[in-house]
Amino acid sequence: MASSFLFHHRTTTFSDDMSIEMETYPFGRDTQPLHDDGKAADMNEEKVQTGFGKVKVTIYGDRKRHPLVTFHDLGLDFLHFPAESNFQNFFQYVSVAEFTEKFCIYNINAPGQEVDAAPLPENYVYPSMDGLAKIVENVVDHFELKHFIGFGVGMGANVMMRYALNNEHRLDALVLVNCVHTKAGWIEWGYQKMNMSYLHKTGMTSFTVDYLMWHHFGRRIDECAADIVRQYRVFFQHLPNPSNLAALIQSYVARTPITFSRDESDGPKLKVPVLQIVGAGSAFVNDTVEVNARLDPSKADWIKVSDSCGLVLDDRPAAVTEALMLFLQGLGYCNPDDERGEADQEDPRHADWLVRCGRCQRRGVLNGGAPAAPPPHHAPHLNP
C-alpha cells in the first residue's frame, strides 16, 4: 500500500483563548518506576562546565563518527526511564548498521534535570531558553564539534532552533519534534504557573502529572499504547527533585518568540535543512505547521506520523526511523541502498505510517509536490 503525502504551508496560529483537554487519573504510588540503571557498553557520561554550571552530557557511540547532538523535553532525561527516556529507546531501536555506526550521539541534559541530579541551590539562577541554547554552544565547544546534526524534542526543539539561528555555520541539519516557536499563551501560562506552585510547595501532584501527560501524549491519550502510557505516568509520579523541574518549566513558560521567516520579512532566514516530525495526536500539530510556514520550502520537510500520539519516538519508532534515514540520505549521510531491518518489514502498519510534506519519498528524497490545504485547526478543550 502506498503512503499518502500532504504538503502544508499555510500559517496556523493558536489563539490565547485556546483550551487544553486533560483527563484526571488517580494519583497512586502503588507502582514503582522501573528505572534501568544499566548503561550500554558504548555509552558514557561527562559533566561539562558551562556558563550556568556543570551539565551532564551522555555520549553514545564512537566519537570518531559524525556527531548528533540532542536536547530533551520537559520532565525527561536521556537514560533513567523505564522506556529509557526521550532518546535512548529510539536510538536503540535503530539498527547499529544503519545509525549508530554512522553517528555519535551527544545528549545534553538541562541543569538539574537528570534523575540523579541534586537539588539546585536556592540562589541558582536558571537559564532562560536563550541561556539553554548557550549551554548547547558551550557543550559543542567543549567537545570541539566543528559540524553536527541537531535533534530536539518539544522544549528541546525550541532550544535547538534558537541555537541554529545564531550558529548556522556549525549545523549540518536540524531534526525537530513537536516544535513550538511562539511565546506561551495565557492558558499555558496559567497552567504552568499552577504547576510551578505545586512543584515548589507540594511536589508532584495529579494536576502536574496530568499536564505532563497531555504535553507528551497529546489530545487522545486513551488511543495511545497502554503500556507506554502507564510507564510514563508512573515515571512522572515519582520524579525526584520537583523543584528542579519547576525551574525548567519557569524558563519554558517565560520563553520569548523565535523570530525567523522564509523571505526575511519577519526575522532572519534559516538556511539549515530541517526535518520536522509530529504525531497525528500531538497537541502541537498546528504549531509545527506554523514553524514550517516560516522555513525555506527547498530545505524543510514536515512529517505527520499517522496513528501516533504526541510521543512519536516511542509510539512509532519505525516510522520516525525511516523518515530520519531518508532525510539523512538526502544530505549524503546514509547509504540509500541500506535495507530495512526484519522488524520493519514484518510490521503490518509500515506502509501506512505517515502523512507528510516536502522532499522525502519512501525510498529516496525528491523535490516536488503541489501544496495542499493545511489540516483543520482543532483547539483542544479544557476539562478542569
Image (tube, rainbow, N blue to C red):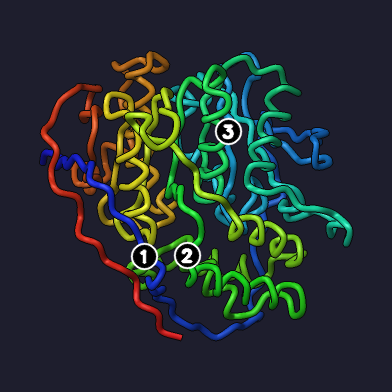
Residue 75: where, in percent of width, then height?
A: 62, 59
Q: CA distance from mark 1 to mark 2?
A: 7 Å
Q: Earlier in the sequence, mark 1 or mark 2?
A: 1
Amino acid marked by disc 3: Tyr
Residue 244: where, in percent of width, then height?
A: 75, 60
Q: Secondary structure at mark 3?
A: helix
Q: Which residue is mark 1?
A: 15
Residue 328: where, in percent of width, then height?
A: 38, 23
Q: CA distance from mark 3 to mark 2?
A: 23 Å
- Quadrant position of residue 68: top right
Q: CA distance from mark 1 to mark 3?
A: 26 Å
At 35% across and 15% down in the image, what residue appears?
A: 335
At 47% across and 65% down in the image, what residue appears?
A: 185
3 vs 2, front mark: 2
Q: Is residue 324 visible?
A: no
1 vs 3, front mark: 1
Quadrant position of the N terminus in the picture: top left
Q: Which residue is mark 2?
A: 185
Amino acid marked by disc 1: Ser
Q: Which mark is residue 163?
A: 3
Q: Secondary structure at mark 1?
A: loop
